[in-house]
């Protein structure tokens, strides 16, 4: 199938059909960018790495402000980078993404205040609950407080749940107890009153984990603490996107009176060694050629599957645009994606709307075409 065939693809009743109409027959041109196409529906964002924040990649520097109106730092606001020592903070890169957002009039989401992973070594080795509580309090007050009025929203707590909906076994649960999530939101509410506050996690569209997330959100609300939204990460497989569970989750979360976002969207095209939908960054597996089937390019059949998956997702997002405030891709282009190295290092994945040369893929054209 040619690229032109993909570009003229339209979605109808769940299946992709291909239009033979000529350019002359088209009466309404497709929007030029994602931010333009969905401007009246929801924000469309992306995660940025250091090179992109500093605008060191010419193609990315042009593409990002054209296509997106929201940005999230991929790593540079995580504790191991922004708070590397007990009394040491490194705000250099965080300040740069805040300035980047202001320059291009973008919604900036801070990611993330409290997460069990990517902690600095001195925190991982803490055995004293009082010390951890002091770090927890100082970290939120200092980092969130610095960007009050500058960062539009924060992922206050990230990935606090196990797959069955119970609290994740982490240093925070072990030393601070199950109320640490509520306390994180309480501290963030005081430190950055002008930012929206979100809970962010993967697989919380799945019934058991969704029930745990709903219980957690209700607990925060019952304590009289502000929580403004929930971020469903959206790390799915292109041939197995759980549309039914996603729609149920949009409705159920919105019924709690909070915003719903899709915060880390990408669709892997590669096999998973455990046939699992988990997205735990600490999971790893051994490389094999069978697990890396497309090192030299994505076959048309898989390109079509990816395109169709994105079309069905965005049709669902548009159906519930009154409940969804933002859709953020976890990366700008395929080459940047964390999925090239997870859970097996050294693979070649194609999970996003732009290829390794920052060129739009067929999925991009098909998603944009939904707004013609």
Image (tube, rainbow, N blue to C red):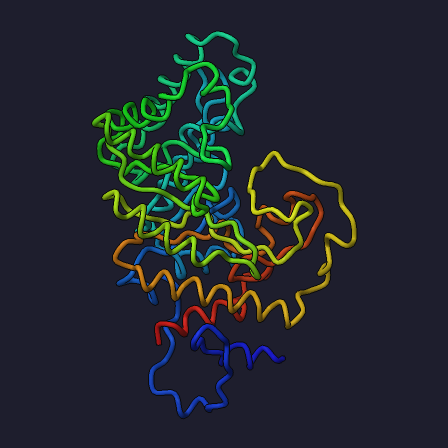
Residue at the right extreme, as displayed: 289
- Please name the residue shown 33% across and 55% down the image: 43
| The one of 93 and 217 positioned closer to us in this rendering | 217
Q: Observer-nearest residue: 18 or 42?
A: 18
Q: Find residue 129 and report its horizontal and vertical position in percent.
A: 44, 9
Where is residue 176 shown, x and y percent of the image?
Answer: 41, 15
In this view, 134 is above or below 272:
above
Q: Quadrant of the N terminus?
A: bottom right
Q: Is residue 231 above or below residue 124?
A: below
Image quarter of the C terminus: bottom left
Number of numbered discs visible in the structure rendering: 0
Q: Give me the residue at 43% from left, 77% from top.
A: 12
Q: Where residue 134 appears, x then y in whole percent? A: 39, 12
| Whole-percent x, y for residue 103 in the image | 33, 49
45 sits to left or right of 289: left
Q: Is residue 266 left or right of residue 288?
A: left
Quarter occupied by residue 335: bottom right
The image quarter in which residue 230 lies? top left
- Name the residue rendered at 45%, 20% in the picture: 173
């Amino acid at each position: 199938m040619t690229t032109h065939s993909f570009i003229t693809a339209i979605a109808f009743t769940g299946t992709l059909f291909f239009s033979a109409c000529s350019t002359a027959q088209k009466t309404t041109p497709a929007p030029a960018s994602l931010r333009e196409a969905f401007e009246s529906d929801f924000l469309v964002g992306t995660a940025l790495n250091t090179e992109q924040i500093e605008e060191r990649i010419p193609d990315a520097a042009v593409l990002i402000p054209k296509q997106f109106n929201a940005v999230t730092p991929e790593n540079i606001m995580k504790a191991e980078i922004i708070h590397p020592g007990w009394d040491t903070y490194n705000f250099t890169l965080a300040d740069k993404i805040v300035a980047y957002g202001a320059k291009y009039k973008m919604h900036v989401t801070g990611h993330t205040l409290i997460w069990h992973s990517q902690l600095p070594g001195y925190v991982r080795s803490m055995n004293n609950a009082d010390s951890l509580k002091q770090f927890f309090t100082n970290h939120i007050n200092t980092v969130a407080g610095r960007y009050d009025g500058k960062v539009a929203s924060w992922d206050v707590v990230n990935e606090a749940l196990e797959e069955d909906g119970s609290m994740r076994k982490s240093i925070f649960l072990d030393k601070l107890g199950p109320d640490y999530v509520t306390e994180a939101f309480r501290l963030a509410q005081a430190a950055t009153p002008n930012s929206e506050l979100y809970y962010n996690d993967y697989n919380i569209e799945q019934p058991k984990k969704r029930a745990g997330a709903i219980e957690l959100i209700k607990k925060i609300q019952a304590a009289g603490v502000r929580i403004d939204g929930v971020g469903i990460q959206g790390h799915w497989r292109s041939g197995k996107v759980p549309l039914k569970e996603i729609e149920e989750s949009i409705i159920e979360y919105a019924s709690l009176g909070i915003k719903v976002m899709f915060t880390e969207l990408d669709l892997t095209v590669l096999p998973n060694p455990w046939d699992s939908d988990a997205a735990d960054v600490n999971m790893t597996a051994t490389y094999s050629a069978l697990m890396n089937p497309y090192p030299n390019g994505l076959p048309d059949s898989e390109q079509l599957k990816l395109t169709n998956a994105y079309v069905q997702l965005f049709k669902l997002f548009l159906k519930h645009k009154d409940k969804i405030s933002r859709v953020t891709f976890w990366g700008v282009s395929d080459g940047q994606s964390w999925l090239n190295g997870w859970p097996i290092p050294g693979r070649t994945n194609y999970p996003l709307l732009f290829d390794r040369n920052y060129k739009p893929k067929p999925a991009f054209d098909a998603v944009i075409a939904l707004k013609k």
